[in-house]
Image (spheres, coloured by chain):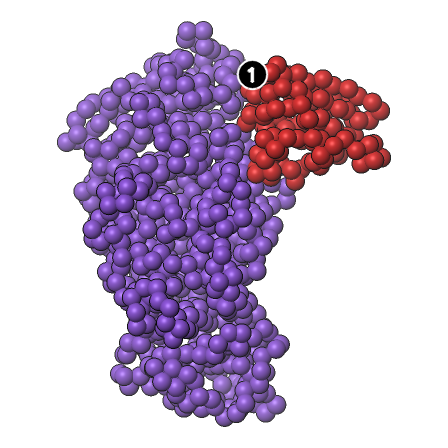
Amino acid sequence: MDRIDAYPSHEYQGYKLRPGKPLPFGATLVPGGINFSIYSSAATSCTLVLFRKREQEPFVEIPFVKEFRIGDVFAMTVFGLDWEEIEYGYRMDGPWNPEDGYRFDNTKILMDPYAKLIGGREVWGVQPDWNNNYQHRGRLVADDFDWEHDQPLEKAIEDLVIYEMHVRSFTAHESSGANARKRGTFAAIIDKIPYLKALGVNCVEFLPVYEFDEFENSKINPDTGEQLYNYWGYSTVGFFAPKAGYASTGKFNMQVDEFKNLVKLLHANDIEVMLDVVFNHTAEGNERGPYISFRGLDNKTYYFNFSGTGNTLNCNHPIVRGMVLDCLRYWASEYHIDGFRFDLASILGRDQFGAPLSNPPLLEQLAYDPILAHCKLIAEAWDAGGLYQVGSFPAYNRWAEWNGKYRDSVRKFVKGETGLIGDIAQRIQGSPDLYASRGPTASVNFITAHDGFTLMDLVSYNEKHNLANGENNNDGANDNNSWNCGWEGETTDAGINALRRQQIKNFAVLMMVSQGIPMILMGDEVGRTQYGNNNTFCHDNELNWMDWTQTEKNYDLLRFFQRIIAFRHQHPILRNRYFLSHSDYLGIGVPDISFHGTQPWQPNWSDGTARTLAFMLNGDYARGGTVRDDTLYVAMNMFWDAVWFTVPELPAGMRWHIAANTGVPSPHDIWDAGSEPLLDDQRGFLLGGRSVIILVGR
Amino acid sequence: MAFSATLEVINDIAKINLVGELDASVANDFRIKIEEAAAQKVKKLVLLLQELKYMSSAGLRTLVFAKQKMGSGVTIYLVGATEDVSEPIHDTGFHHSVIMLETYDPEVIEK
């Protein structure tokens, strides 16, 4: 027998209607029709606006009659619509009183914040028709992707090696080998999965893939005439929809399937997928920005204005909190996403007046949510308002953090600054000084990320070179802790270039032997350069694109990264969930971790000029003593000259082998497991200037 | 070019020949043919695409419907898809759910 709720009770201009279901919010396929549900606390009326795909004028506007509203939710089912061929939006009427936060304007057509598919920017970089009164257009999507047996991988977070990637940049360069139609898309990444596998990363963290507008604040660089974009996408149009312009099938509106297919195939190759999510502000800009969605739906609920930008999402308002939760649950369940990195996450812990909350309800709710229970949650633990919470982000035993202190300390140390030995000892252990009660898995260890220099530029530039951004070099960070190794920018000086490569390898080793979760920036493994630009947010060109010819030109770097990542995977002693204890709790005569100087058991803690440090990890303590590993010894010499290190004695029958030595040219800089050469003099070695060595005791 | 979908069932093989442009306005015609084929409990469904010039998202979606309607026990062959038709099928991963052939090969399909 048919359900009675499949029958209309009302009619408007020939369209059959009935009162809708208020939940779930958004547009939902129901028997015979589509259920539209939208929230507004202060709208006096609401109208559903329906378009045929891509048409400028709607074919009907259906007002929500009084009985289609319950509480603050307008809900209506419309029967007989071809869901694949329509676009929908809303008009809201209500008070215009900006001083009180009300900005209703019924001339605007507003996108559903819960839209699962968004039209209007189907093909990347194609100039929109700015005369169109409805730029970002809600569409419906079927949840019928064939996942087969896929599910989130649920890897232990300490086992991850994260690769931060911009979808378009990864394959937009013609050297990617993708045909012109596919370059810069989700589909093109699939062809590069073997590269990621060979590199050894097991988690890809995508810069924003939610629908954004590359034309937001786009402009022409007055100096170069070049089109500048909102390229990175840290400005969301729709939180529930993948970016159509990132899909080769975007013009067919198949971006959902294309992205799901990418996730499925990454999973099939044992690679997790993490999304960089941006809940701190939206594409509506400040009060002079466009009406896309929230401003016209319920400005007072969705935004607050402590930062003065006018578009700070009011994340701890219960309604907005619900939307954020719905959004993440949707991506986790519908797209099988393994984790989320929250851009400028500290803002999620502020109240409506901007004050930090001691127990932020949103962060707590995400931490305890049953659907997100196995998702990784990673915070960028600071915000644009000056709140810096590295080490103090409200974590609820769930949240990890981008460890900005790790980045800064290791940069300074490798650069050769003094007074950092104690600091580095903390970073290598997973920063127990910051995360004492949380463990090393709270620490995402990184040297570079999309913000700032690439690794090659970190060792090639003392200063930022951002003129191409069209802001007189005023944008981008000034505190880069970079060192150009003797020449600013590209050079043919072989000595300088060799030193730069060595420094890159030093960074790579330190990241991979540190407790915590390492994260690599896309292209660092092949020496990608942005030519000194440390804020390439607006460039759709070689400043951001990965040049795949570098996989050959800089093969020595790629080879080194592949092997040092493999080394990390091979050694569980490097991937502990809990902090090392410095104690001999197994009663074997040595502790789990011990620090050393140039002489064993004598670290230079009190020497403020020291640039050397060594540490030893006893393999019997791997994973809290539950698995056996080799004993590892790592010595770091950031002094410019060679230094003799005497090594700790191994138990009888064991000998030291050289796994890596960044002071030696490729291919003798790193060795595959099992082929490591024996250390000539088992008492010690002369370590070159600005070099790191890893010894394996077995 | 007008769209047409014609169904032929021989033994346990259903063949649907698609001609023209498959978009939302005609996707239901295709869908009906799939339902007819499913009703005959065939073991193989062959979609002959040599003369299909274009397929919209609604058409692609109908392929998904075909896979789900026929069930996992039915093998689906897509034969002779042009580049314009095959590229979105590959990019969305649907080719993993079917067997794509350049030409009709009785040795493969009718064995």
**Residue A684 rendering spot, x and y as whole percentages:** 48, 90
How many numbered marks does the figure carry? Answer: 1
**Residue A584 rendering spot, x and y as whole percentages:** 48, 83
* One can see residue A375 in this view: no
Element type where label 1 sits in the image: loop
User: What residue appears at the point 38 percent right and 47 percent down from the top-left corner?
Assistant: A541
**Residue B101 rendering spot, x and y as whole percentages:** 72, 35
Label 1 crowd (10 A; few <14 / some 14-19 / many >=20):
few
Is residue A219 left or right of A153 when viewed as pictured? left
User: What residue appears at the point 50 percent right and 60 percent down from the top-left corner?
Assistant: A551
Closer to us: A492 or A427: A492
Q: Please determine whether, in this image, residue B90 is positioned above or below residue A596.
A: above
Question: Which chain comes out purple in the rendered image?
Answer: A
User: What residue appears at the point 44 percent right and 68 percent down from the top-left corner?
Assistant: A508
**Residue A669 rendering spot, x and y as whole percentages:** 50, 76
Give the residue type at disc 1: Ser
Question: Which residue lies most toward the front here?
Answer: A492
Quarter of the figure with the C terminus of chain A = bottom right
Closer to us: A539 or B93: A539
Q: Please determine whether, in this image, residue B84 is positioned above or below residue A355.
A: above
Is residue B21 left or right of A431 when viewed as pictured? right
Closer to us: A570 or B76: B76
Question: Which chain comes out red in the rendered image?
Answer: B
Question: Which residue lies most toward the left here?
Answer: A99
| Circle 1 chain | B
Quarter of the figure with the N terminus of chain A = top right
* One can see residue A486 in this view: yes
In the picture of the structure, the residue carrying the numbered disc 1 is B25
User: What residue appears at the point 74 percent right and 32 percent down from the top-left corner?
Assistant: B103
* Quarter occupied by residue B24: top right
Is residue A45 left or right of A52 when viewed as pictured? left
